Image (spheres, rainbow, N blue to C red):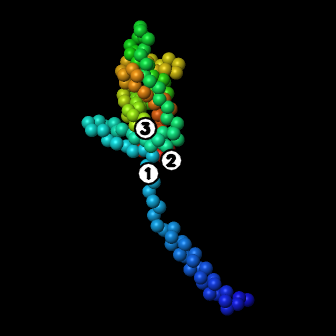
Amino acid sequence: MFSKHVWPAAGLLAAAVLALAACGTAPAPELASPATIVPVKGSDIPRLELTPGAVHRLGIQTQPVTAAAPGTAGAAEVIPYPAVVYDTDGSSWTYVAVTPGTYVRRPITVTVIRGDVAMLSAGPPVGTRVVTVGTAELLGTEYNISGEE
């Protein structure tokens, strides 16, 4: 049996619960996006701008394009094979680091793959830094693929 003082307390408790529940209906503030896709004038390929935190979380690493050894049949440049990205149509690409945290996909022509390097007959110039770790994540960002599909 409840005392007559319990019912007002129960009513206040119910009102407090409802008030707190109403607080949860406000939209959460939007967080800054870790990556921005920026259209490039005159190109179908956008520039990807990542926050320093996103670069760190993805573990993005780069290495420079090197010159092919003299006499290497049809190859002018060499990149690490992990820097090669294949599109659905079979074309090959690599992501170049424009500035720290900014990347653009560039077409390449692979002539041969030897171990862990790809020999190119066309691609970014020697010295250009290409992404060797994080290429799949950049491609997913560019095509807006979250990995939950």
Q: Which residue is mark 2?
A: 148
User: In this orientation, does residue 141 appear?
Assistant: no
Q: Nearer the viewer, mark 1 or mark 2?
A: 1
In the rendered image, the residue lying farthest to the right is 1
Secondary structure of the residue carrying tag 2 is loop
Q: Residue 77 sits in which quadrant?
A: top left
Q: Amino acid at mark 2?
A: Glu
Q: Earlier in the sequence, mark 1 or mark 2?
A: 1
Give the answer, above or below, for where 79 lies relative to 72: below
The image shows residue 130 at horizontal and vertical percentages of 43, 28
Sooner in the amino-acid sequence: mark 2 or mark 3: 3
Q: CA distance from mark 3 to mark 1?
A: 15 Å
Q: Amino acid at mark 1?
A: Ala
Which mark identifies residue 32? 1
Work out whether residue 60 can be spotted.
yes
Q: Amino acid at mark 3?
A: Gly
Q: Is residue 27 placed above or below 53 in the rendered structure?
A: below
